[in-house]
Image (tube, rainbow, N blue to C red):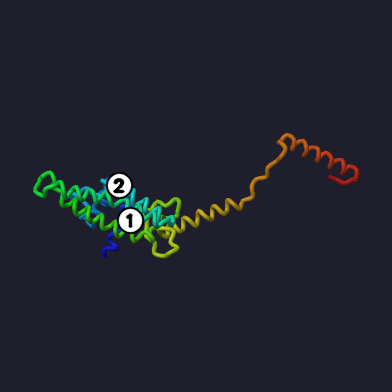
């Protein structure tokens, strides 16, 4: 259960795109808040927006997808100290009764969950892939592979990638246009000369036109 929840969360964050309208934003934001309330401080702002978590996840995904799993795991480790420091400062500097730290407990819970997610993610880097479709415009570009040879995030991207490869092969197989050494005027003179020579030959042999 935890694996599925964490997997869906990190995919949602890595693939998050700001919606074009307020209705879509409210829908996406609301779904995350319902599924992961422990990461929303004050019930409105997701904690990861404050600390560029998306950039770190996307970098990890790219490294893992390129086959450099050790570098990807190291990237995950680099993300941890931020939350360790924030958690330590939070515990040292606040009083739960202090009104100015109304959301201190919520932040503490959020930091603990994020550290747990990062610890879990370190063991998942071998499954992380970035869709190989160069024009992928889905919300699944960053995904977890199921099979070793998985390269695309969905069937639509598989079909589109095949179409792109077919178009590329057709372009490569096309015969390139003939390149002339002489300019157009010289070629016209040569064609006229050849026509006159052919007329003379036909006149000598008595052939009709």
Q: On the image, numbered disc 1 is attached to which residue?
A: 11
Q: In this orientation, which residue lies closer to the viewer: 127 or 194?
A: 127
Q: On the image, numbered disc 2 is attached to which residue?
A: 52
Asked if 112 appears above or below 193 in the picture, the reply is below
Position of residue 139 measured from the top left corner of the image (x, y, whole percent): 36, 53
Whether residue 184 is visible, yes or no, is yes
How many marks can you see?
2
Q: Are marks 2 and 1 in contact (CB under 8 Å)?
A: no
* Res 183 → quadrant: top right
Quadrant position of the C terminus in the picture = top right
Q: In this orientation, which residue lies closer to the viewer: 11 or 106?
A: 106
- Mark 2 surroundings within 10 Å by alpha-carbon count, few (fewer than 14), some (14 through 19), many (20 or more): few
Position of residue 109 measured from the top left corner of the image (x, y, whole percent): 19, 54
Task: Find residue 165 and name its label.
Answer: none
Position of residue 133 measured from the top left corner of the image (x, y, whole percent): 45, 54
Quadrant position of the N terminus in the picture = bottom left
Asked if residue 184 lies left or right of residue 197, the reply is left
* Res 145 → quadrant: bottom left
Asked if 190 appears above or below 94 in the picture, the reply is above
Whether residue 141 is visible, yes or no, is no
The residue that appears at 40% across and 51% down in the rendered structure is: 137
Specify the farthest residue to the left: 97
Q: Tell me which label, 2 or 1, sits earlier in the chain.
A: 1
Q: Quick one: SS at disc 1?
A: helix
């Amino acid at each position: 259960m935890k694996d599925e929840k964490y997997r869906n969360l990190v995919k949602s964050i890595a693939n998050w795109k700001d919606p074009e309208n307020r209705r879509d934003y409210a829908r996406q934001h609301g779904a995350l808040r319902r599924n992961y309330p422990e990461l929303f401080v004050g019930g409105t702002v997701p904690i990861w927006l404050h600390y560029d978590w998306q950039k770190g996840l996307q970098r990890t995904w790219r490294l893992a997808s390129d086959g450099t799993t050790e570098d990807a795991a190291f990237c995950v480790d680099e993300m941890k100290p931020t939350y360790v420091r924030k958690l330590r400062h939070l515990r040292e500097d606040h009083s739960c009764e202090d009104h100015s730290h109304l959301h201190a407990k919520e932040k503490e819970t959020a930091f603990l969950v994020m550290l747990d997610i990062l610890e879990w993610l370190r063991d998942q880097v071998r499954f992380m892939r970035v869709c190989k479709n160069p024009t992928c415009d889905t919300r699944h570009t960053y995904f977890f592979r199921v099979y070793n040879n998985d390269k695309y995030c969905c069937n639509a991207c598989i079909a589109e990638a095949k179409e792109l490869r077919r178009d590329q092969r057709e372009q490569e197989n096309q015969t390139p246009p003939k390149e002339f050494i002489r300019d157009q005027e010289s070629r016209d003179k040569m064609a006229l000369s050849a026509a006159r020579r052919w007329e003379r030959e036909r006149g000598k042999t008595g052939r009709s036109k």
